[in-house]
Image (tube, rainbow, N blue to C red):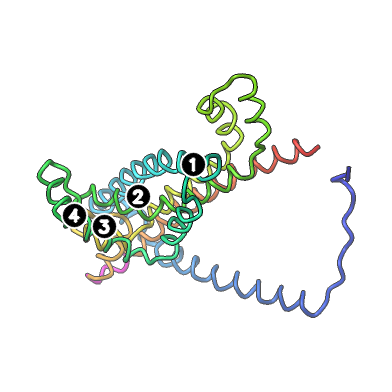
Amino acid sequence: MRSSNRPRKRRRADGFSVFAIVVALLVILFISSAIFSIALGGAPGFFENLRSQELRFALRLSVLTSTISTALVMLLALPTAYALTRTGMPLKRLSSLIIELTLSLPFILLGLALLIMFSSPLGKWLKAQGFAVVFSPAGIVMAHLLVNLPYAVRLVKTAFEDSDLRLEFIAETLGASRFRSFLSVLLPLCRSGIVSTAILTWSRAMGEFGATLMLVGITRMKTETLPGSIYLSISTGRNDAAMSTAVLMLLISGAALFLSQLAAGRRRGRKRVERR
């Protein structure tokens, strides 16, 4: 068993390593300059614009729709990932391919697909029953759902595949049902990965724009989310308001990333303890 405290041999610098470091530094510089341009551009009027009624409405709507859609996504992603990793589900490979395909499609195309679906006779019938989606805040949740569900399924599926099947087998040998084993063994084993997935899904929902624009449009103080607020502000020449909203989204994304990394760090820590 190798000791984790053993000093690693320092590798000699070679031409390719130097090249890779230079490219990495250029990439970091490029990304950092983009982030700092937002921070520096929006910082002066940030607190003043934060008091505007429109920005507060966009923030509330974004948080509400992102939270609802994330809850729905996780409720659907967990059993879907279980079916793909733990059952003899028919056409499993084709099902995984369909889920993966949506990850490579432009979001605006997914929004168009939803627009076609909910403009059909079935969609009109749902509207008559009180479930309006097109040009409605409910459509924001549907757009988030279609965009983020494949992403969440993929992450949860990876977490399930990395978990130890032997513990589930032992639990079932001792008389636990599949459902009980899922709740008491698999979910606790993958807790950090699931929490990290939920946080990242919520953060992606907060920043989603393409599918939402296609399905519900951007109506001020009705379907105006934070990305939509930036779009409207730029369109009307209110660049200071757009930059302030961008800074707010940057802070939200940074906080979500920190929490996600914290959850992932705990997961890695537990794996190191198990290996010892």
Q: Depth check: 111 or 23 in front? A: 111
The answer to whether marks 2 and 1 mark residues whose Cβ atoms lie closer than 8 Å is no
| Residue at 86%, 67% in the rendered image | 11
Report which quarter residue 103 is drawn in.
bottom left
C-alpha distance separating marks 4 and 3 = 9 Å
Residue that mark 4 sits on: 134
| Residue at 89%, 53% in the rendered image | 7
* Mark before the other along the chain sequence, 1 or 4: 1
Residue that mark 2 sits on: 145
Q: Is residue 238 above or below residue 7?
A: below
C-alpha distance separating marks 2 and 3 = 11 Å
Which of label 3 and label 1 is nearer to you?
Answer: 1
C-alpha distance separating marks 1 and 4 = 32 Å
The kind of residue on which mark 2 rests is Leu
Query: SS at mark 2?
Result: helix
The kind of residue on which mark 1 rests is Ala
Residue that mark 3 sits on: 114
Q: Quadrant of the C terminus?
A: top right
Q: In x, y percent, where is residue 117?
A: 22, 56
Which class describes the residues within 10 Å of circle 2: few (<14), some (14-19), or many (20+)?
many
Numbered mark located on residue 46 in the image: none
Q: Depth check: 159 or 30 in front? A: 159
The answer to whether marks 2 and 3 mark residues whose Cβ atoms lie closer than 8 Å is no
Query: SS at mark 3?
Result: helix
Q: Which residues are magenta?
A: 236-240
Q: In x, y percent, where is residue 37?
A: 46, 69
The verdict on residue 237 being magenta is yes
C-alpha distance separating marks 2 and 4 = 14 Å
C-alpha distance separating marks 3 and 1 = 25 Å
Q: Quadrant of the N terminus?
A: top right
* Mark before the other along the chain sequence, 2 or 3: 3
